[in-house]
């Protein structure tokens, strides 16, 4: 058995799980509602608030999907009950971020400001403290969506290895390169 696939998922009290005939799983909680289509080779069973996934055969494909769908369902349950949070740090002189409604405005050293529309499921806040790098905090109940939005923001100004300027996650380690040595 897959180590991840065979582990059980315990539902918190405020979370409900519905399984439709065509293996469409819907998870509802305090933060929101998520749905996921499960492959027909994987069966989902909900008994007394404990979810168990079983696969039809021992083929390599079914073994891989067993762990995948268990992880996806676990992320859905965690998201609608607790939510997810990602923090991005803007490192560079003059880099700024402001949030107005669902629009994130970034000044990243280009000749123009970058305006990015955020999905309704993602809430953003920008914090600027004097003497520190600006921090953009993203919060959502959908792990996949918040990761995609964070990756898109990071791609606007990737971290360069010489001075370390760019957008990075808070606490992320950046491998630095040595610059040119002075000629003698």
Image (cartoon, rainbow, N blue to C red):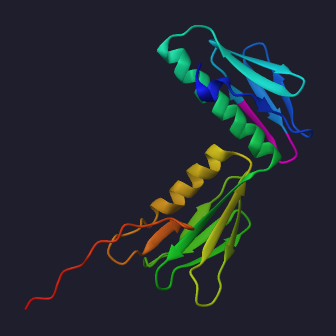
Where does residue 13 sit, x and y in percent of width and height? 92, 38
Residue at image point 26% right, 76% down: 178
113 sits left or right of 13 in the view: left
Tally of marks:
0
In terms of image quadrants, where is residue 54? Answer: top right
Q: Which residues are magenta?
A: 29-35
5 sits left or right of 180 in the view: right
Rendered view: 84 above or below 168: above
On the rendered image, what quadrant is the C terminus found in? bottom left
Residue at image point 69% right, 40% down: 75
Asked if the stretch drawn in magenta spans residue 31, the answer is: yes
In terms of image quadrants, where is residue 102? Answer: bottom right
Residue at image point 50% right, 85% down: 94
In terms of image quadrants, where is residue 171? Answer: bottom right
Rendered view: 1 above or below 50: above
148 sits left or right of 43 in the view: left
Rendered view: 182 above or below 169: below
Asked if the stretch drawn in magenta spans residue 38, the answer is: no
Camera-nearest residue between 151 and 14: 14
Residue at image point 47% right, 85% down: 93
Q: Is residue 81 visible?
A: yes
Where does residue 14 sit, x and y in percent of width and height? 91, 40
Q: Is residue 113 visible?
A: no
Q: Residue furthest top?
A: 57
Q: Residue furthest left?
A: 184
Rendered view: 52 above or below 182: above
Where does residue 127 sit, x and y in percent of width and height? 67, 77
Where does residue 1 sit, x and y in percent of width and height? 59, 18
Camera-nearest residue between 67 and 90: 67
């Amino acid at each position: 058995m897959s180590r991840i696939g065979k582990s059980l998922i315990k539902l918190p009290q405020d979370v409900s799980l519905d399984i439709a005939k065509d293996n469409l799983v819907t998870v509802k909680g305090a933060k929101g509602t998520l749905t996921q289509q499960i492959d027909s080779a994987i069966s989902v069973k909900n008994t007394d608030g404990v979810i168990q996934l079983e696969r039809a055969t021992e083929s390599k494909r079914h073994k891989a999907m067993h762990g995948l769908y268990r992880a996806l369902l676990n992320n859905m349950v965690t998201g609608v009950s607790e939510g997810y949070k990602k923090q991005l740090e803007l490192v560079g002189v003059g880099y700024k971020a402001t949030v107005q409604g669902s629009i994130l405005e970034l000044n990243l050293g280009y000749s123009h400001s970058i305006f990015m529309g955020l999905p309704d499921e993602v809430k953003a806040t920008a914090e600027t403290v004097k003497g520190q790098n600006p921090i953009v905090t993203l919060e959502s109940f959908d792990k996949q969506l918040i990761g995609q939005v964070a990756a898109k923001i990071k791609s606007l100004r990737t971290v360069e290895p010489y001075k370390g300027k760019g957008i990075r996650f808070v606490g992320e380690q950046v491998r630095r390169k040595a610059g040119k040595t002075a000629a003698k």
